[in-house]
Amino acid sequence: MTDYKLIELPYNKEDLAPGISEQVVEWHHGTHHQGYVDGLNKAEQKLQEQREEEDFSATGSLLNSFTHNFCGNVLHDIFWENMSPEGGGKPEGELMDKIEEEFGSYENWKKEFKAAAGSASGWALLVYIPQRDELHNVAVDRHDEGAVWGAHPILACDVWEHSYYHDYGPKRGDFVDSFFQLIDWTTVQDNFMEISKTFN
């Protein structure tokens, strides 16, 4: 069994400021995200131990822990990687074409995504569903409640309070506006193309 590792940031902790302060990145990445990695490794270890001991009395709680921490780790990986100090602007190429096809316009997508971020108790996601060749915005509570089977996140915005409260207080919408200015659309496009080519 290979241990999961905390992703290295593709930029310095201070580089996302003023959109996200260095202090928030330090706490969010080094404490919160690390906690999901640690929880995932612990759940994996305990699951392996119960298999070896053939005692499955703790299976329910261990599987819940695995799911919560695994999803938290994956979504945080996407979150950090889909931001850049040189971010902002709009998507281009095939991703922009697909957004316009699905949502009518980039601005429509943006408004719906911001509404999803305002309603979620966890994450706003742009996902690609290869079985239907569709993009959808999804509001996910915690890390996995409201997730869509078969959907692959290509853009993730963390709207747990630890993501923004230090910088913005209760003004989540201001944080989401700043997030739009940090999106690395090249990475999002790469995610979209990789998944669409893999499954279609």
Image: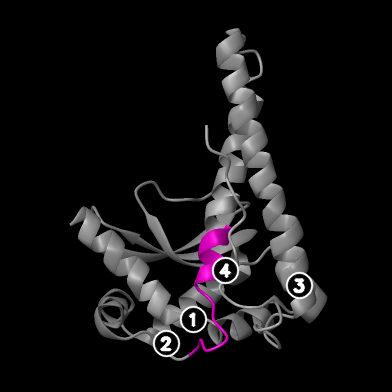
Q: Earlier in the sequence, mark 1 or mark 3?
A: 3
Q: Badge 1 is on which residue?
A: 111
Amino acid on which the number 3 mark rests in the picture: Val
Dot in front, 4 or 1: 4
Dot in front, 2 or 4: 4
Compared across the picture, whether 103 is left or right of 80 comes to left
Task: Pick whichever, 85 or 158, lies toward us.
Answer: 85
Contact, mark 2 vs mark 1 (Cβ under 8 Å): yes
Magenta stretch encompasses residue 81: yes
Amino acid on which the number 4 mark rests in the picture: Trp
Q: Badge 2 is on which residue?
A: 107
Q: Residues within 10 Å of mark 1 (few under 14, many from 20)?
A: few
Residue at screen point 50% across, 88% down:
88
Between the residue at mark 2 and the residue at mark 4, the CA separation in whole angstroms equals 23 Å
Contact, mark 2 vs mark 4 (Cβ under 8 Å): no
Residue at screen point 66% across, 19% down:
58
Amino acid on which the number 1 mark rests in the picture: Lys
Residue 17's spot in the image, x, y percent? 70, 86
Q: Earlier in the sequence, mark 2 or mark 4?
A: 4
Q: Badge 4 is on which residue?
A: 80
Q: Badge 3 is on which residue?
A: 24
Residue 163's spot in the image, x, y percent? 71, 68
Q: Residues within 10 Å of mark 2 (few under 14, many from 20)?
A: few
Residue at screen point 51% across, 50% down:
146
Secondary structure of the residue carrying tag 1 is helix
Extent of the magenta region = 76-88
